Amino acid sequence: MSLIPATILTGFLGSGKTTLLKRVLAEAHGQKIAVIENEFGEENIDSDILVSDTNEQIIQMSNGCICCTIREDLRATLRDLAEKKRKGELDFERVVIETTGVADPGPVAQTFFMDDEVAESYLLDSILTLVDAKHAENQLTDRQEARRQVGFADQIFISKSDLVSAEALDSLMHRLKHMNPRAPQRAVHFGEVALKEVFDLRGFNLNAKLDIDPDFLKEDDHDHAHDHGHEHHDHDHEHGEHCNHPSHQHDHGGHGHHHHHDDDVKSFVFKSERAFDPAKLEDFLGAVVNVYGPKMLRYKGVLFMKGTERKVIFQGVHQLMGSDLGPAWATDEVRNSKMVFIGIDLPKDILLQGLEQSLV
């Protein structure tokens, strides 16, 4: 049986997760979706859909979707759903897991890799993070969980953007991009987004495409004309006063960008045209993940490795790291490695230096 695609939906309280979910369920376009609510709080899909005092954990809805509220373990629920599907007791094509507003999506994502039974039944498609434009600045500043959710995202939807000025939205998008240059951002109206933008994004696949916003890479290049991996010159504008990014120069009516670069969730990119030595790289990454794993949210790379004619693709969540052989390098293609790391207060210098020393 083919794997069941799973989507993790995260975002802070009030960001519109429930609106998005209700829309997805109402407009399921003939798709049968199992929704797992990973919380039992007041933010549940409204009681007309979920009856909270029932003992039944799984509720079949009129349009063929299924809702269940987890009171125990996510793994058990996923296994249970997969088994019922195999036996023909439940019919659904995909799963959406809504996390609590304050949850760290990391452990939810890890479930898909740690548990063999879950891994054999499901494919983690992507982590979607909803950001509420009106309250995001404060939430991101005050709440680490909100920053972590941004760091984990494969796709960011910004809701309520019509309630803020264009400058404030621009400033927010900049801030989010520094936290996570991998995730495309899209402003959506009241959580209304086309289903094709929500499902089958393949954001979590090990694929040969590394989606880092090209402007983010350019910004690194033209400000500092060395792209051979010597990127440890503290140029990620940690300190607003050295910041020469054009949009940061004029203080948008008090929405200055300077405080953004103090976010503890940051990203940085490593690039090199020299090949990696596989043994050295493995040792180094193993050591880094051992020490900093809990602070490493997402990391991904397409690597030029000595000894293979194919691209090596690697990615990880926290301590879990996996790699895969990708397509062969094309004859006219410049072989190079690109990696992006997203994490909490990661020691950029140590990481970049270690990667540099793992090159042939």
Image: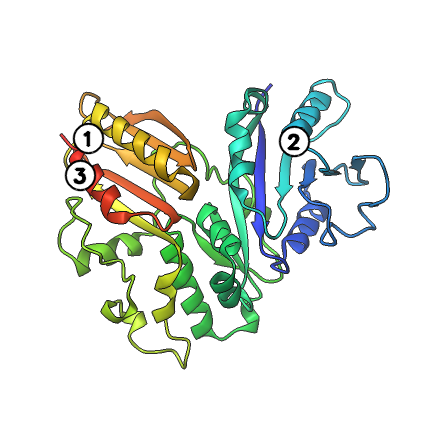
Q: Is residue 185 above or below residue 167?
A: above
Q: Amino acid at mark 2?
A: Glu
Q: Amino acid at mark 3?
A: Glu
Cα separation between marks 3 and 2: 44 Å
Q: Residue at x 67, y 27 (%)?
A: 76
Q: Residue at x 80, y 45 (%)?
A: 50
Q: Nearer the viewer, mark 1 or mark 2?
A: 1
Residue count near mark 2 (Cα–Cα under 10 Å), binned few <14, some 14–19, many ≥20: some
- Mark 3 or mark 1: which comes first in sequence? 1
Q: Give the x, y percent position of residue 4.
A: 60, 28
Disc 3, SS:
helix
Q: Is 199 left or right of 67, judged from the image as shown?
A: left
Q: Nearer the viewer, mark 3 or mark 2?
A: 3
Residue 54 in which image quadrant:
top right
Cα separation between marks 1 and 2: 41 Å
Q: Which residue is mark 2?
A: 93
Disc 2, SS:
loop
Q: Which residue is mark 1?
A: 276
Disc 1, SS:
loop
Q: Is residue 86 above or below residue 158?
A: above
Q: Residue at x 36, y 62 (%)?
A: 262
Residue 60 in which image quadrant:
top right
Q: Residue at x 55, y 45 (%)?
A: 196
Q: Amino acid at mark 1?
A: Phe
Q: Is 277 left or right of 149, judged from the image as shown?
A: left
- Mark 3 or mark 2: which comes first in sequence? 2
Q: Give the x, y percent position of residue 67.
A: 74, 39
Q: Is 75 left or right of 205, judged from the image as shown?
A: right
Q: Give the x, y percent position of residue 166.
A: 46, 73
Residue 338 in which image quadrant:
top left
Q: Nearer the viewer, residue 107 or 150?
A: 107
Q: Which residue is mark 3?
A: 356
